């Protein structure tokens, strides 16, 4: 039973810390749903499996919970019961909605996309942790072409990598990447942190990686990533790439961050040969090899992404 549950967690890329003495596991998914798994004896030859949610989306928890319980009973390999990923069509951006075909849409106001980006920035400037979290979640959606307009994605993505005196987004992202804290948050952090504080910091750091990945992907699709890299080379070299390599190397402690960082490296590696040289010069290949060894037996998505990133970096 324990082996089947472990295989399920690896297949679904769920972070797990095991306690063999008490027969329990502390788990966290990539969308930061935390839960516990405990095994009990039924007094005979059977095993009772308890899966208890601690925090995060109840809906997402139930999908993983069912998969874990099915795996415990030997009814599946741990994957969801949905159709294979290869058979699903690629999602299109909202601008491709069928209901908008043939409809003449007035050009959006040049202020509209910038306003929603500014709203996310204002949330990051507040001194409430929940408000800051909402700001990062908004920014993650604004850089996702499946969630918002192309123009909004373009503006949000540029604000992530571009230094602009009128925007503090890149500074906030850099601070979260390097220090797990917003610059404006330094003065009111609690002196002693509990588990919730650490979870909050780790979630904010992961969101910042997700925002960066979305921004890099959007620029790659637009064909402007190389240009932005050259225009802001010092930020990429001095801030972003070292953080990405560090997070990949810390895969054993933070596999979800490592997976997202590896996605960013894969995105950058396809930019240009000079960029690949910069990434490899920061020690990426060693970090990726280390992460691959861990991911092979603990985090399927990490192992897959790392393999792709490594292959691209070695391309001449």
Image (cartoon, rainbow, N blue to C red):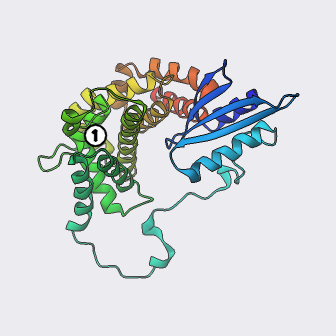
Looking at the image, which residue sits at the far front?
43
- Decide if residue 120 is in sight here: yes
* Badge 1 element: helix
**Quarter of the figure that contains the C terminus:** top left
Instruction: Tell me: residue 56, above or below residue 188.
Output: below
Q: Residue at x 62, y 40 (%)?
A: 52
Report x, y in % for residue 120: 27, 54
- Decide if residue 316 is in sight here: no
In this picture, residue 23 sits left or right of residue 307: right
How many numbered marks are there?
A: 1
Q: Nearer the viewer, residue 147 or 225?
A: 147
Q: Nearer the viewer, residue 215 or 12?
A: 12
**Quarter of the figure that contains the N terminus:** top right
Q: Residue at x 28, y 29 (%)?
A: 179
Please name the residue that numbered disc 1 is placed on: 173
Asked where in the image residue 250 lies, by quadrant, the reply is top left
Looking at the image, which residue sits at the far bottom?
103
In this picture, residue 78 sits left or right of residue 179: right
């Amino acid at each position: 039973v324990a082996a089947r549950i472990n295989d399920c967690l690896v297949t679904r890329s769920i972070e797990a810390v095991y306690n063999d003495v008490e027969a329990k596991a502390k788990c966290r998914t990539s969308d930061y749903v935390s839960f516990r798994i405990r095994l009990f004896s039924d007094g005979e030859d059977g095993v009772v499996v308890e899966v208890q949610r601690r925090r995060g989306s109840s809906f997402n928890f139930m999908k993983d919970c069912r998969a874990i319980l099915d795996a415990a009973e030997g009814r599946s390999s741990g994957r969801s019961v949905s159709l294979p990923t290869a058979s699903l069509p690629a999602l299109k951006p909202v601008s491709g909605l069928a209901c908008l075909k043939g409809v003449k849409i007035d050009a959006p106001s040049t202020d509209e996309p910038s306003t929603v980006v500014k709203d996310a920035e204002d949330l990051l400037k507040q001194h409430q942790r929940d408000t800051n979290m909402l700001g990062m979640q908004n920014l993650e959606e604004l850089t996702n072409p499946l969630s918002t307009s192309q123009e909004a994605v373009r503006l949000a993505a540029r604000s992530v990598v571009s230094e602009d005196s009128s925007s503090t987004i890149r500074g906030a992202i850099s601070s979260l990447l390097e220090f797990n804290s917003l610059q404006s948050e330094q003065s009111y952090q609690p002196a002693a942190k509990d588990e919730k504080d650490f979870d909050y910091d780790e979630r904010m750091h992961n969101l910042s990686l997700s925002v960066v990945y979305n921004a890099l992907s959007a620029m790659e699709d637009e064909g402007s990533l190389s240009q932005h890299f050259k225009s802001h080379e010092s930020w990429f070299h001095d801030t972003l790439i070292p953080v990405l390599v560090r997070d990949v190397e810390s895969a054993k402690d933070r596999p979800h961050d490592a997976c997202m960082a590896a996605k960013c490296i894969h995105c950058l590696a396809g930019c240009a040969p000079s960029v690949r040289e910069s990434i490899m010069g920061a020690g990426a290949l060693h970090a990726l090899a280390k992460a691959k060894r861990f991911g092979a037996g603990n985090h399927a998505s990490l192992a897959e992404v790392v393999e792709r990133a490594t292959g691209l970096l070695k391309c001449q």
